[in-house]
Amino acid sequence: MAAASCGFVEHHAHTEEMFLVGLTGGISSGKSTVSSMLRELGCPIIDADVVARKVVEPHTPAYSRIVYHFGPEILLENGEIDRQKLGQLIFTSEEKRKLLNSITHPEIHKAMLKEILFYFLRGYRYVVLDVPLLFETRRLTQFLNHTVVVYCDPATQLSRLMQRDGLTQEQAEQRVAAQMPLNEKRGLANHVIENSGSREDTHRQVLRLHTKLEDSMDFLLVRVIAVAATAGLSGILLYAAKMFLS
Ligand SMILES: CC(C)(COP(=O)(O)OP(=O)(O)OC[C@H]1O[C@@H](n2cnc3c(N)ncnc32)[C@H](O)[C@@H]1O)[C@@H](O)C(=O)NCCC(=O)NCCS
Ligand SMILES: Nc1ncnc2c1ncn2[C@@H]1O[C@H](COP(=O)(O)OP(=O)(O)OP(=O)(O)O)[C@@H](O)[C@H]1O
């Protein structure tokens, strides 16, 4: 079985050798930055924010339920959901946020599962799931072998968020407050990427993480070889016993 970069193996997939990596963090802490670095290294990434956009496209079940509950005033002229408007509603009301989550999250998880299967069928050994609300929903954590939190200090997170999304400080603080504190998430993860510094510094840490994930795969290969060797040895012993007894 030939192993190549980032969990990709030629030939068919074996479910017992597959594993999932959860990548999370806070809003604007740098998940996309880290996941694009991992993607450049060849890792298969499933981005929950991208999936979340697909499952609310017009004519989908989640779209109909959002329009039913939030009203047609939530739509743009072309019929698509006005994400900015919906964002303003759900980041200022916990009740509305919970309602939107109850509509979108089951659809997001189903669509992600399909993508995971697609990667595994193509022979990838592991898939990285970029999920902002990984520890808030906890639905996926039981399936993960590694969890990675992209951390940055609160002041840097706030200023990057304000700058990227053109938000006021109050709006940015509301969005940060809608999630589990980043410090708490850091304590729940197996691996932490500290992204308060430069991109180069983050890149160095991503390279180290990548090596660790590849090593996990080596461990699995060693395990497979050990099992094969044990099976081979048992075969020889069985053959010797038969010869001895006959
Ligand atoms: C509220 C929406 C319309 C805002 O869309 P917009 O394009 O402006 O932002 P985008 O989707 O890129 O999300 C940006 C970030 O906001 C944060 N965020 C998004 N939804 C939520 C939520 N329900 N609760 C807390 N934080 C959230 C995440 O950190 C995410 O990375 C959109 O985020 C949405 O539909 N959210 C509900 C689905 C969801 O939970 N998505 C997160 C992935 S599981
Ligand atoms: N190390 C860094 N140095 C400078 N700017 C950075 C660094 N890391 C990320 N940024 C910038 O900070 C902003 C947030 O980063 P990014 O989009 O990767 O976060 P995110 O966690 O994916 O956000 P969200 O979950 O809200 O989509 C972006 O504008 C990005 O270019």
Image (spheres, rainbow, N blue to C red):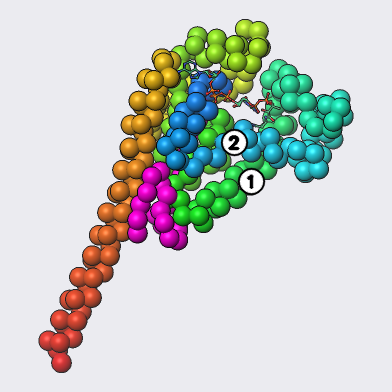
Taking 183 as reference, is 68 above or below it?
A: below
Q: Secondary structure at mark 2?
A: helix
Residue underneath mark 1: 111
- Magenta stretch containing residue 6, yes or no? yes
Whole-Å distance between the Cαs marked 1 and 2? 9 Å
Q: Report x, y in % for residue 31.
A: 51, 27
Taking 245 as reference, is 130 above or below it?
A: above
User: On the picture, is 67 further left or further right than 120?
Assistant: right
User: From where the camera sits, is residue 163 visible?
Assistant: yes
Assess whether mark 2 and mark 1 are in contact (beta carbons under 8 angstroms): no
Query: Which residue type does callout 2 highlight?
Result: Ala
Q: Report x, y in % for residue 223.
A: 29, 55
Name the quadrant containing residue 208. top left
Query: Which residue type does callout 1 highlight?
Result: Ala
Between 175 and 219, the one lying in front of the other is 219
User: From where the camera sits, is residue 144 visible?
Assistant: no
Say whether mark 1 is within 8 Å of ligand 1: no
Q: Report x, y in % for residue 243.
A: 15, 87
User: On the picture, is 180 further left or further right than 202?
Assistant: right
The residue lying furthest to the left in this view is 244
Q: Report x, y in % for residue 145.
A: 41, 43
Residue at 43% over, 60% down: 11
Q: Ligand 1 is located in which of the four quadrants? A: top right
The answer to which of marks 1 and 2 sits earlier in the sequence is 2
Residue at 43% over, 19% down: 199
The residue lying furthest to the top in this view is 169
Which of the numbered marks, if any, corresponds to residue 48?
2
- Magenta stretch containing residue 85, yes or no? no
**Magenta stretch, residue numbers:** 1-25
- For the residue carrying disc 2, how many other residues have a C-alpha within 10 Å: few (<14), some (14-19), or many (20+)? many
